[in-house]
Amino acid sequence: MRHKKSKFQAKLAESAEPFAKFAIKFTQVTNPPKTAVILCSVLETEVEHFARDLTHIVHIAKLPQGLHDDPPRLRRELQSLVDQIESEHSPEVIALVYGLCSRGTEGVFTKTSRLVIPRAHDCITLLLGSKERYADYVRLHPGTYWYSPGWNRHHIPPGPERHRLLYEEYRDKYGEDNADYLMQMEQNWFTTYDRATYVDMGVGATEDDIRFTKGCAEWLKWNFDRQHGTPDLLKALLTGQWDEERFLVLEPGQTFSMTADERIIDIVDERLGRETGRITERESDERFGQETGRIDIARDPSADHD
């Protein structure tokens, strides 16, 4: 026997209908696959925190911050680590806690396990919790430079300390007059930014860190903002909730490249010579090594979060 909805239930369903298309369908994974995780050290505190009690994660490996400044090097080191993990730990899945990262992750592939990567341009998407929130914020505030617990710890962000250390380096290498000129050139990128935004997902943030970021903003004459991110995207990556909207899941031999739409990344097509998208290491090096090798990464902080 079917029960007729009450007026309240009908009204509630009606009011929820316009928002249904924005809802993400979460799949409860009761037995997630044996997973290895590779991360950039910028997110090591967050990953260690949320992976702490996950028994299906058999190995966690990290690479140093800053490899995105040299995309071919990032690709080589990431691929080498993937190969090593497959050989030594035999995971069913390797999860990359990375985005495109100056396209340095393009072309990476597995031989025996599946590969999972978030649909993200960089780690800021992971900190905020979604690519949509990232896109909305950048659209509203295009002159944003991002600070975070990991970024503040693993590199020297724009501010008085960076200025002092860089000046001393230039002075010691090139002399005082040349150092003054080089510092003027180095500061030219300031005009493209007007906001220092500190983002965290409730893990690793300290009052000292926030004061430091505020001090950098004041010294740079930028606005300061604090964004409270969510761990939703990172937790889904670690626990096997890989819906197509937020993640790309690749079979052994498949790889991915950047798209020109909101998907951000997708499996490569037959241009690599295989309709299935499966490629060899040589094919990966030939296409993606040359593709990103032509990119002249600016040696200023504007490249830091690519």
Image (tube, rainbow, N blue to C red):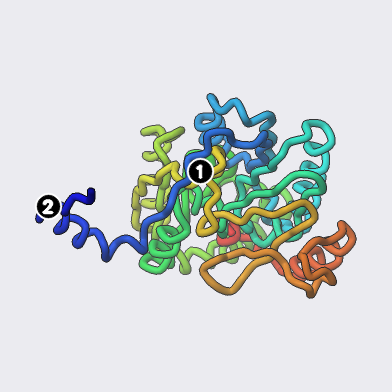
Query: Where is residue 241 shown, x and y percent of the image?
Result: 52, 45
Residue in the picture at 57% in, 53% down: 118
Sequence-first disc among 1 and 2:
2
Under tag 1, what secondary structure?
helix
**Disc number lying in front (1 or 2):** 2
Residue type at the position of mark 2: Ser
Which label is found at residue 6?
2
Q: Position of residue 228 (x, y in %)?
A: 36, 45
Rendered position, 33 above or below 280: above
Relative vertical location of residue 170 with respect to residue 256 in this rendering, above or below: above
Q: Quadrant of residue 138?
A: bottom left
Residue drawn at 38 percent across, 58 percent down: 222
From the viewer's perspective, is residue 131 above or below residue 50?
below
Q: Amino acid at mark 1?
A: Ala
Residue displayed at 50% across by 32% down: 50
Left of 192 or right of it: where is 218?
Answer: left
Evaluate if marks 1 and 2 touch, with contact meaning CB atoms under 8 Å apart: no
Q: Which residue is mark 1?
A: 236
Q: Position of residue 274 (x, y in %)?
A: 82, 69
**Residue 212 shows which numbered tag?**
none
Q: Total marks drawn?
A: 2
Q: Residue furthest front?
A: 1
Q: CA distance from mark 1 to mark 2?
A: 36 Å
